[in-house]
Amino acid sequence: MRNTSQRRERILQQLVAQGGVQVSELVAQLGVSAVTIRTDLAQLESQGLATRNHGGATLNRTPPQEHSVRQKDSLNSAQKEAIGACAARLVQPGDNIIIDSGTTTMPLARHLHDLSGVTVMTNGLNIAWELANASSVELMLTGGLLRRQALSIQGAQAEACLGAYNFDKLFLGVDGLDLQFGLTTHHEAEASLNHKMVERARKVIVLTDSSKFGRVSLHRIALLDRVHTVITDAGIGAEYREGLQRLGIELIVAE
């Protein structure tokens, strides 16, 4: 595996799945030298994701537990409402946008009813239901398979659908945002579709409450160099304020 980023992501996935990895096993699996694997583990350790030990490493940061949409609805609801209102102010009449499924993006949909000439594509059944009666919004849904846990549509058909379009803005919800590892989510197919969304949008806007900072879920969506704007709440810490600024990412704090 030649791509360093992909190799380290795979190592992290094994750490998350197994709780620990061995250098000798990774050498055999990935076809690289022990020196390369030790360098990879040292990098993961520097990011606070792993702790090296004799012959390997153990997971140092437990990924967050996945909740259903109903459970997520009750978590940080006031912050999500404020984030959605801020996000809606970035949508202009005539925009073509993608709204990712999720409960952080749901308040954004509620604030779009009065905008005219906006085209919205979504993979979220909750988003589509919210916008079904918004007569001024042209609503499009991806095809694909329904993931009931998240009320989201995903899979090869959904990804192929996105390939035919270009969008002005993507409003993306995430399960984790880490300065080094990037944007992550719990489910592989969801991460793959989100990555495709990132590729099809000219501007990527991440909507996340501050509890997601420093979290790393199993599957990466994209590195932060693909992100233009992050909208969050006042709970964001100094490390992430400064880190996002260093990366040239616009930060909007919803009050």
Image (cartoon, rainbow, N blue to C red):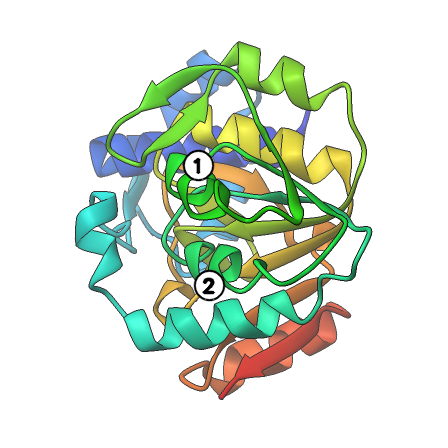
Q: Is residue 210 visible?
A: no
Q: Residues within 10 Å of mark 1 (few under 14, many from 20)?
A: many
**At numbered mark 1, what does the secondary structure look like: helix, strand or loop?**
loop
In space, the residues marked 1 and 2 are separated at their CA atoms by: 16 Å
The tag earlier along the polypeptide, 1 or 2, is 1
Q: Is residue 24 visible?
A: yes
Q: Is residue 208 left or right of residue 73?
A: right
Residue 126, quarter of picture: top left
Q: Residue at x 47, y 50 (%)?
A: 44
Residue 100 pos. (x, y %): 52, 43
Of the pair 68 and 34, the residue shown nearer to us: 68
Residue 115 pos. (x, y %): 68, 60
Residue 89, quarter of picture: bottom right
State which quarter of the image contains the N terminus: top right
Of the pair 29 and 3, the residue shown nearer to us: 3
What amino acid is at disc 2?
Answer: Thr
Residue 67 pos. (x, y %): 20, 46
**Looking at the rendered structure, which numbered label has been put on residue 208?**
2
Q: Residue at x 60, y 19 (%)?
A: 159
Viewer-nearest of discs 1 and 2: 1
Of the pair 100 and 247, the residue shown nearer to us: 100
**At numbered mark 2, what does the secondary structure look like: helix, strand or loop?**
loop
Q: Is residue 15 left or right of residue 199?
A: left
Residue 136 pos. (x, y %): 66, 49
What amino acid is at disc 1?
Answer: Gly
- Pointer 1: what residue? 124
